[in-house]
Amino acid sequence: MKQTLAILLDGYRELNHRKLFWLVLVLSGLVVVAFAAVGNDEEGLTFFHWSIPFPFVSTAMIPKADFYKIVFSQFGLGLWLSFAATIVALISTASIIPDFVDRGSIDLMLSKPIGRVRLFFTKFASGLLFAGLQVTVFTVAAFFVIGLRAGDWEPWLFVSIPLFLLFYSYLFSVQAVVGLLTRSVIASIIVVFLFWGALFLVQSGDNLTLMWRVTQEIVTERKEERIETFQVRTLEAEDLRSDLSLRASAGDEEAEEALAEAERDADIRVARLLRMKEEQEEDLRVLGIATEVNFWFHLANTMLPKTGETVSLLERILRDRAGLVIPVGDEDNTQRQFGAMVGPRDFDERMRKELGESHSVTWTIGTSLIFELVVLAFGAWWFSRRDY
């Protein structure tokens, strides 16, 4: 245990000597200063002691606490933590593993009485220490800004620390193993950003094809109900035509006059029913394609870490527990567009059910951690068998 703590302390000292570490801390500080400098009053927007008339963000429209929560969710969480700070952190920590396995550094470490597996995971943890310090400083500062400026103390903000570290660890595990295999800082940066982009494409594809499948399911079900109703009316029309035909053959003049109209109506209904069944076959074919495409996207998403869904989980917790106003993103706009095709209420209910079953919290975090553990286990195995 002492050796592990010593290596972590050495990792902290290494970070402390990195200019990028202090640069990111300074950037986090500037983001917090900008966060604290902006506010709203009775007239509109404020910046330090200046007041800018802008009634749409005045306290009459948006309470001060809600204003700061909106700023934190849109800029602190949506822009800084889950995007800009992550990019800078990945660039900053990219050299930890390649520098570690360089000759000279690795020889000194291997001479100490510590197992290689523990040594690898300890160096990985020291990389997470960088991101942990950054998000902790930012979250604590944001907590005090919202509390002091708006009088609303939200302890649920601190859930950002473990969930952001979880989100970051998915990416850093891949970066660490690539750095171990290639011993190249540039390669580890390029690969992790390509991997992050691929995750975005897979998760977007999973969500979009799920919306497509749900929409097609509802459309198919509704058309099937219409066909069943129309079949009943078509049978009634056929029965009426048969009845009028029998009455007309018996010499009923009124039945003869009504028979022609009944025959035209029955023929129209039969032709329309055939067209509806052809459309139903096409809808079922499209539904089959949507189901199959969504299956493969969901399978790929299940096998990979869920960076976007982990951030969405953080947003959901902060929205439900801390009352943060989360901005409506492109995914929500897309959902509304899909929902408009079949009725937003039915679409939303079906989507919530599908997401609860196939995109649960356990699935999001559990499968992501399994992927990360597999990657790290491979990295530990490779590090243990290599001669340095």
Image (tube, rainbow, N blue to C red):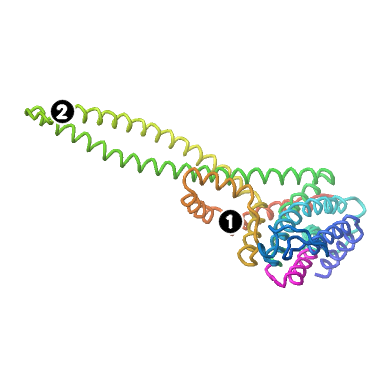
Task: State the residue at coordinates (83%, 70%).
Answer: 2
* 379 left or right of 15 in image: left
The structure residue drawn at horizontal position 40% and vertical position 44%, both measured from the top left corner, is: 221
Q: Which residue is mark 2?
A: 257
Please give left or right for residue 241 compared with residue 165 in the image.
Answer: left
**Percent x, y for residue 104?**
93, 53
On the question of residue 122 being in view, the answer is no
In the displayed structure image, the side of residue 358 where residue 376 appears, left or right? right
* Location of residue 50 in the rendering, given as x and y in whole percent from the top left corner: 82, 62
| Closer to the camera in the image, 181 or 212 | 212
Residue at position x 52%, y 42% in the image: 212
Instruction: Name the amino acid type tagged 1.
Output: Trp
- Name the quadrant containing residue 241: top left
Q: Looking at the picture, tell me which residue is in the foreground, 287 or 144.
A: 144
- The residue that mark 1 highlights is 363
Residues shaded magenta: 136-156
Q: Residues within 10 Å of mark 2 (few under 14, many from 20)?
A: few
**Local secondary structure at mark 1:** helix
Q: Is residue 293 visible?
A: yes
- Compared with residue 232, is residue 353 higher up or lower down, i.e. above or below? below
Amino acid type for the residue under numbered disc 2: Glu
Q: Is residue 151 above or below residue 25?
A: below
